[in-house]
Image (cartoon, grey):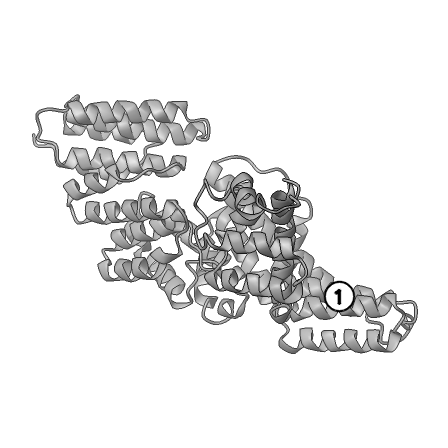
Amino acid sequence: MYNSRLLKTLRQIPKEDLTNFPKYVKALYPKRTIDITVLDYIMDYAPNFNERNALTNESAYLTLFSKEPNKRPKKSISNASASLFTLLEEFFLWQDPKEDNFERQYRLAKIFKKKKLDELFFRSIDSLEKELNKDNPADMASAANKLKIGHIKYYHVDNQKISEKTPLINELSILDNFYIVTKLKYCCELFNHTKILNSKSSELLFLEPIIQYLEKAKPEQVSPLSLAYYHAMKLIRDIDYESFNYLKSNFRKTICTFEKEDQCILLSYMINYNISKFRGNSPNEHKDDILETIKLGLEFDLHSIKDSITPTRFINIIEMCCFLDEPELNSNFINRYSTYLKGEKKENAINFGYARIKFHEKDFGATLSLLNKTVLNNIFFKIREKELKIRSLYETWNGVDATAISSCCEAFSKQVSRETALNADHKEAFINFSRITAMLVNKKKDKEGFLRHVKQKELLYLRNWIIEKIKEIKP
């Protein structure tokens, strides 16, 4: 029972749901006495449900039923647990209709159609159409809902299909918009993945005709959401600065009116673009753009989705704030979004974030101390943890004993070489960083020799930092 679906779910739901679920079961199913008895037993261990010895089928059975004259079968506990999970699902559905009126009304319209209650059917469909057209949002979900309504109405046996004012043109227009937005949205994700993994994407059917249509169409013929994802696609695929400017300049005009999911996704592509510039060879040229993107996320609360932020986004924003030398902005961001980090990753992400801040403040001892408390599983985080440790050791190096840094660099190179998730270019860039750092502390070349060596390396992680350290070498 301890690892049952019921208890795994109860551990994660809000406290309000934990309070209301037993009330729901007892109010609607008062005759299910075994289920209620087992539920009361379980709820004694709320809200964490971590007592392994008590929360087993055997313990619950011995406590609840072993002294009964007519003993119940031992499967009573597992059966009750499965039954309660089904009731928990029903409880979630019972709560939901208040929040999703469309699905409720659409389901009701289908019931009217099935029962041949045509007057009620057409009335409910007309009401849904008016509701959907009232705000006229351009998001994918709205377009999909309009297509569902149009389909169920048009193909009703009593619907007049042949008329001068046929609804088909409208339905096809909705379908075109839905297809264009959906195609571009998924293409953006695909290009984003291939960019991160530095892999090749397969040929995408019908993408080029969509691009040609959008480039030739008049503004009034294209939805703002389609244009936004078109520019996001160009930003990712072509690293197109004009597309970044389009998204930035239109964020407060139109993009802020989209569904929050679309706002978050589009902003994340802008942030990824800025990260690539921030880690490139000329980061200072993009300071204003980086600052504006971070501020947009704070202004419209878009750095999290559904009260959750990934450790990747959390750490990336901190690193960019450090680069911008914006301690107040960094503090504002951490105070606001650290609560949105979930589970065991929370402490590690916060520790690494503060380690990055301490490194920026040149408190390298504190950086190393925080890194020693950090355990990161993601390979890219492991690499950033190791490079920050190597750089902190270098900054505290006494100029004599290079054993610690050399060992760390060697271990880093071996780790990168073994890592199957990294492609060849990533591996070469990371290994060149560690080898050149080791060469610096072991004084393998003079300043000019090092600069020539670095210039020859096409792939080099943290090139600007390496060059900065080389320039500090005394003749």
Q: Nearer the viewer, residue 219 or 199?
A: 199
- Tell me if residue 246 comes above or below residue 354 in the rendering: below
* Residue 104 as seen in the image, left or right of residue 44: right
Question: Would you place residue 470 above or below residue 435 in this image?
Answer: below
Q: Is residue 305 visible?
A: yes
Image label count: 1
Q: Quadrant of residue 383?
A: top left
Q: Percent x, y for residue 264? A: 48, 59
**Image quadrant assignment for residue 191:** top right
Q: Amino acid at mark 1?
A: Arg
Furthest residue to the front?
Answer: 69
- Image height of 121 relative to 47, above or below: below
Residue at the image position 49 percent from the left and 64 percent from the top? 16
- In the rendered view of the protein, which quadrant contains the C terminus? top left
Q: Residue at x 24, y 62 (%)?
A: 328
Q: Nearer the viewer, residue 139 or 56?
A: 56
Toward the viewer: 393 or 310? 310
Instruction: Label 1, secondary structure: give it.
Output: helix
- Location of mark 1 (residue): 107
Q: Quadrant of the N terminus?
A: top right
Residue at 60% over, 66% down:
95
The answer to whether residue 183 shows anywhere in this view is no
x, y percent for residue 392: 19, 37
Question: Where residue 354 appears, x then y in whole percent?
Answer: 25, 49
Residue 381 or residue 194, whichever sits in front: 381
Q: Position of residue 249 (x, y in %)?
A: 44, 66
Residue 196 relative to residue 27: left or right: left
